[in-house]
Image (cartoon, rainbow, N blue to C red):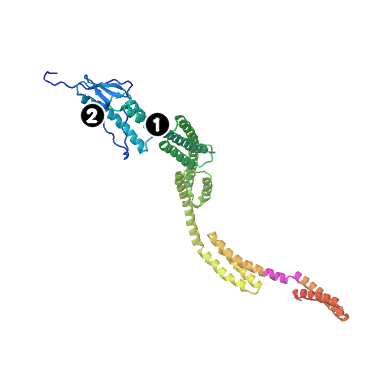
Amino acid sequence: MSATEPSKPTPPVPAPPVAPLPRKLPAQPVAPVAAAAPVAPTSSPEEVAKWGRVSDDGTVEVLEGETWRVVGQFPDGTPDEALAYFVRKYDDIAFKVHALEQRHQAGGASASELATQAGHVLEEATEAAAVGDLAGLRERLNALIGSLAEATAAEAQAAKELVDAAIAERTALVERAEAVAARDLSKVQWKQVTSEMGELFDAWQTHQQTGPRLPKGVAQQLWKRFRDARSTIDKHRRAFYSELDDAHKAARDAKTRLVERAEALASRGVDGIPAYRTLLDEWKNAGRAGRKADDALWARFKAAGDALYSARAEQAAAEEADSAPRIEARQALLEEAKAVADEPDIKSARALLTRIQRQWDEVGRITPREKERALDDRLRVIEQALKAREDVDWKKNNPETKARANDMSAQLVEAIEKLEAELAAAEKSGDKKAAKAAADALEARRAWLSALGG
């Protein structure tokens, strides 16, 4: 340093603290409170003189109770500058105290957090290298800590209740997962189970992110149970889908071979239809190959069958065209057969129907078979109507039936003559009871004779 350069002032040297200074508190937002008064800096000469003094060598002392305590030295400045420096240190502590009081009055801040911060500030205000009413600050801090004690206890109880509720909620999730894992997993719908477990896991993650922090041991124990249940379900699900993949592969291979065999029938045309039907039965018993594979293979299998049935349809159309004249011939015979019902003479009706039946057979076969059956059914109705007429006629004109009827008629005539004689005798004798009996019997015999045509 040159001789012409002014000497720099020596910075003030605080007295070494009796106790270690606390760590610096993080800045905390201070909620505005209308009722709280701002902190008045200890800057008036009277206040400064009341709490601090400076000796000739720049040593600064603060009054605590009845004792003056050295807080530091400020050798290169005036006494006012020395005191101002240490007063600012006091104001810093006083501001922290005031901020904590404001936050407590405003509410909403954690009482336990405020109590912890107040304790730190209390340590800072003890044996602090500052000039001001340090004892008053400590009294205010002790009062604040005392008022926060009850709120801190209430907060702790509320926090415990929240944790207990969170444990119960997470335990319920675990029990639901374990209930799913305890099912007969060989018979469940895996899509439903997977969805259910996904919802439970999402609920677990949401609970972890938004719920209170659980004790480490409890949280680990619950997670182990939940994880074990998920592992059990995942193990069975993987086994199920592995078996399903194997079954799908076997079905896919079997159906591929059926498709190839069906496609090979194309050259046989209509004659390949019976073989295709056999392949269709095998297809139904081949099992599932997975929707995508099943759809693709079925499209090929069906196309092979459509080709065969298309050939049959073409053949049927050709046969139907060839049968058109025979169909018209049989329809004409049906029109002619309507006269059978109108013919009163049964023998003539039978002769007419016999001729029509002979011509019907001479027409020949008709395709498709459905049309031939429909025409045959119409002729059969006419045949059955004539047969019914013949049955009635036979019963009426049967010689044996006639003989039995004649014999019965003779017996009834003889009985009627006898009853008429009995009725006349009873009436003559005045026997009303015998007359009534004979009249009733006579009426019954005459009714029977009438029924026999006598």
Q: Magenta segment, principal secondary structure?
A: helix
Q: Amino acid at mark 1?
A: Gly
- Of residue 249 and residue 197, the one placed in the foreground of this image is 197
Q: Amino acid at mark 2?
A: Pro
Tell me if residue 361 can be seen: no
Q: Is residue 278 left or right of residue 19?
A: right
Q: Quadrant of residue 452?
A: bottom right
Who's the residue at 27% across and 33% down the image? Answer: 40
Quadrant holding the C terminus: bottom right
**Secondary structure category for the residue under label 1:** helix
- The mark closer to the camera, 2 or 1, is 2
The numbered mark at residue 146 is 1
18 w.r.t. 320: above or below: above
Who's the residue at 88% across and 80% down the image? Answer: 429
Expressed as whole percent of the image width and height from the top left, the position of residue 392 reads: 69, 70
- Of residue 75 and residue 156, the one placed in the foreground of this image is 75
* Residue under label 2: 45
For the record, the magenta segment spans: 390-401
Q: Cβ–Cβ below 8 Å for labels 2 and 1? A: no
Expressed as whole percent of the image width and height from the top left, the position of residue 440 reads: 80, 75
**Counting other residues with Cα less than 10 Å from the Cα at mark 2, is it few (<14), some (14-19), or many (20 or more)?**
few
Expressed as whole percent of the image width and height from the top left, the position of residue 322 reads: 50, 61
The extreme left residue here reads 4
The extreme right residue here reads 429
Expressed as whole percent of the image width and height from the top left, the position of residue 356 reads: 59, 68
267 w.r.t. 35: above or below: below
**Secondary structure category for the residue under label 2:** helix
Q: Quadrant of residue 198?
A: top left
393 inside magenta stretch: yes
Q: Is residue 137 left or right of residue 261?
A: left
Who's the residue at 54% across and 69% down the image? Answer: 332
Decide which of tag 2 and tag 1 comes sooner along the chain: 2
